[in-house]
Amino acid sequence: MEPKLYFEDTIAAIATPPGRGAIGVIKISGDKAYSILKKIFRPAKNHITFESHRFYYGFIADPESGQKLDEVLVVYMRKPYSYTREDVVEIHAHSGYYNLRGILELVLKSGARPAEPGEFTLRAFLNGRIDLSQAEAIEELISAKSKEALTLAVHTLSGKLSEKVKSLKEDLLFSLAQVESAIDFPEEDIEILNPPELTQHIEKIIEKIDALIRNYQEGKIYKEGIRLVISGKPNVGKSSLLNSLLKEERAIVTPIPGTTRDFLEEEAQLGGLPVKLIDTAGLRETIDPIEKIGVEKAFQKLKEADLVLFLVDSSQPPDKETISLYEKIKPYPHLVVLNKIDLSPNYVDEWEKIIQEEFIPISVKEEVNLNLLVQKIVEKIISEKGTLTAEVVPNLRQKVALEKAKSHLLSAIEELKGKEPLPELIAVELRSALSALSEIIGEVTTEDLLSEIFSRFCIGK
Ligand SMILES: Nc1nc2c(ncn2[C@@H]2O[C@H](COP(=O)(O)OP(=O)(O)OP(=O)(O)O)[C@@H](O)[C@H]2O)c(=O)[nH]1
Ligand SMILES: [Mg+2]
């Protein structure tokens, strides 16, 4: 990537979220940041120069008309001591979209251009202040869906993943050096190569890579959350359960079977885990064309679920439809939940004979066992996906790069096992593995990869 592209112009954006708030911040980065500040800021006290990293109080005013826009605090951060390592100015104004928009327009008129999503962080990366894994960690920190995800993001931001990757690269360079000297001295290449020893060394590297890949699996649920699908026949209380878990009357609940036709997705926290709750249409044969689509979608959602809650109405005796649905749900990770235990007559005992696995009796209406249900959901997820013990957790992109590195190392070992291992071939595999590791921290990147990563950021970050 040609960094110059990004360095030419000065960028600006509103850095705080839209909506009501106490203050709003406008950020400017680039060579013109300082001159723009001089143009549009009227200090309360007459001073000519701005010291770096100091707040100044005054007004933003249009230099042409002299019209005052807002009372503000401004700070100038001289390069390279800033987020982007460029000259940065922040204007701390009163919040409110129109006010901030007005100031931003003045900034743009004075020589800046609007920043793209993530462009400030992109500059921080291109200017070498952070590596790519740290840049991603900033986005992960902002969008963390659980306390654990936040901690993991902070670890990556502070460079813990980068350290691991760098140490893996050093290990690998050591092996590569050995292979390269075998290439340089073809007469005695086998002695220099020492296949058993080299294999062992590479296997150790693979072990470390495997550990990081396992961490990905472990951390995934905390970072990305899980998809929890509520499924069952019509009228069993699926939407009621969704509302109760959300603590909000989100879905329509009525005694009429077939109330929910489309699916609903809402984010929630269950026992500290980020969860996407999905309420679906009650599963039944139907001739209603709209409901039919809903039922098809509900079946589709089962496939995407990390966990299915199969909800049964325990005030009704066991019936064929439910039993056949249960058979369909069994292959998915699931929990059986018997609802409406507050009603009598009640058929929990009869259902127990059919279900033959642990189930959770609840009443959404009377709020019985709802905490137990949450606890069982969390236990089930953790038993399947593992608890979080890892300190450093790669994201999906980084995991893919680790897998790529691993597969090249495996090919190198394969070659070493042969009768006459070719040092040239081994070197090619080791170099490819190195480059895959370099991708993680962004020593090797493409423009596509960068735009893919930074487009996920918000504007102003
Ligand atoms: N007594 C009792 N009634 C409940 C309970 N849970 C839900 N209901 C009632 O059961 C009826 C159906 O509830 P919904 O939440 O709409 O059921 P659903 O499974 O979403 O139904 P569909 O959207 O039609 O598939 C409503 O009248 C609820 O008030 C419960 O624990 N006890
Ligand atoms: Mg419903």
Image: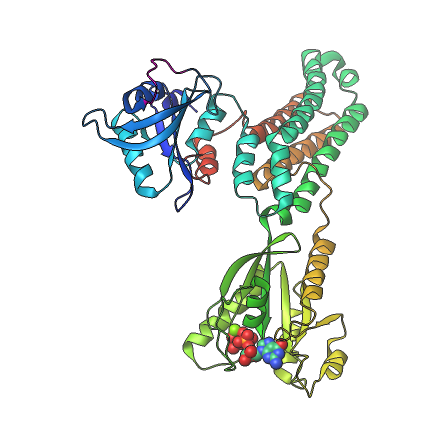
- Answer above or below: position of 82 versus 450: above
| Residue 459 seen in this snapshot | no
> Residue 433's quadrant in the figure?
top right
> Residue 318's quadrant in the figure?
bottom right
Q: Residue 379's spot in the image, x, y percent?
A: 73, 58
Query: What is the magenta range?
Result: 43-50
Q: Residue at x 49, y 69 (%)?
A: 251
Front residue of 128/298: it is 128
Q: Main secondary structure of the magenta part?
A: loop
> Residue 10's quadrant in the figure?
top left
Q: Residue 382's spot in the image, x, y percent?
A: 71, 54
> Does residue 54 appear to the left or right of 383 in the view shown?
left
| Residue 203 seen in this snapshot | yes
In the rendered image, the residue lying farthest to the front is 45
Q: Residue 72's spot in the image, x, y percent?
A: 36, 30
- Answer above or below: position of 280 versus 51: below
